[in-house]
Image (cartoon, helix red, strand yellow):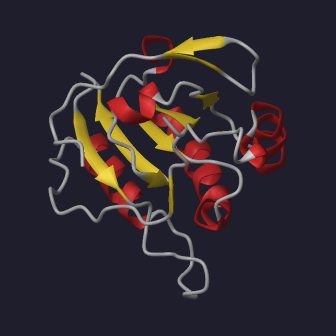
Amino acid sequence: MLPLGTKAAPFELPDTVSGKHINLDSIRGKKATVIMFICNHCPFVQLVNPGIAALAKEYTPRGIAFAAISSNDVENYPQDSPELMTKNAAEQGFTFPYLYDETQEVAKAYDAACTPDFYIFNAELLLVYRGQLDDARPGNGIPVTGHDLRGALDALLNGQSVSEVQKPSIGCNIKWKKQ
């Protein structure tokens, strides 16, 4: 996992929602920035999509920026194509950019391993949280609340330290291109 305190790696990626190229500096939040590695086909992501859409709507007005990135190999996983990302973002009501990392360089720079994978960077773009949204998993009956991510965001907003006890995310492995 990316060590806490790591500076967010800069990026510029195409946004499948707006059709524009977006860089980290243009989307960073005044208080924090949440970077999420997700995709269309993963059942773990499908379960939490409504929760992340709701969190973004709740926390964006409070100075928290959100961006999702899909880094999957679309040649072997065509359901994660940019065209279907656009459709998925609309269906889910995403109010944040859904970026396509075709080269997979951004996923590698963030040490992203699975979808979903969540990172919170403070106002200085230093990593304060990396891990799961909450304990909900397909089939486990636990409701999606965003408990873990919400706790970290609330701590930041209240001027408190984010707990260093953080559970790694569990989901589908990022679908890496064959070298």
Confirm whether residue 179 shows in the render: yes
Confirm whether residue 97 shows in the render: no
Please tell me which residue is depicted at 31% across the width and 62% down the height of the picture.
Answer: 168
The percent coordinates of residue 27 (x first, y second) are: 50, 19
Is 166 situated left or right of 31 in this image? left
Most distant residue in the front direction: 179
Query: Eyeballing the image, is 157 above or below 10?
Result: below
The percent coordinates of residue 79 (x first, y second) are: 78, 48
Please tell me which residue is depicted at 22% across the width and 25% down the height of the picture.
Answer: 7
The percent coordinates of residue 90 (x first, y second) are: 82, 40
In this orientation, which residue lies closer to the viewer: 100 or 20? 100
Is 163 situated left or right of 101 in this image? left
Residue 138 in which image quadrant: bottom right
Query: Eyeballing the image, is 8 above or below 176?
Result: above
In this orientation, which residue lies closer to the viewer: 46 or 151? 46
Query: Eyeballing the image, is 57 above or below 12?
Result: below
Is 138 situated left or right of 84 in this image? left
Is 131 situated left or right of 58 in this image? left
Please tell me which residue is depicted at 15% across the width and 35% down the height of the picture.
Answer: 5
The percent coordinates of residue 63 (x first, y second) are: 44, 30
Please tell me which residue is depicted at 50% across the width and 12% down the height of the picture.
Answer: 26
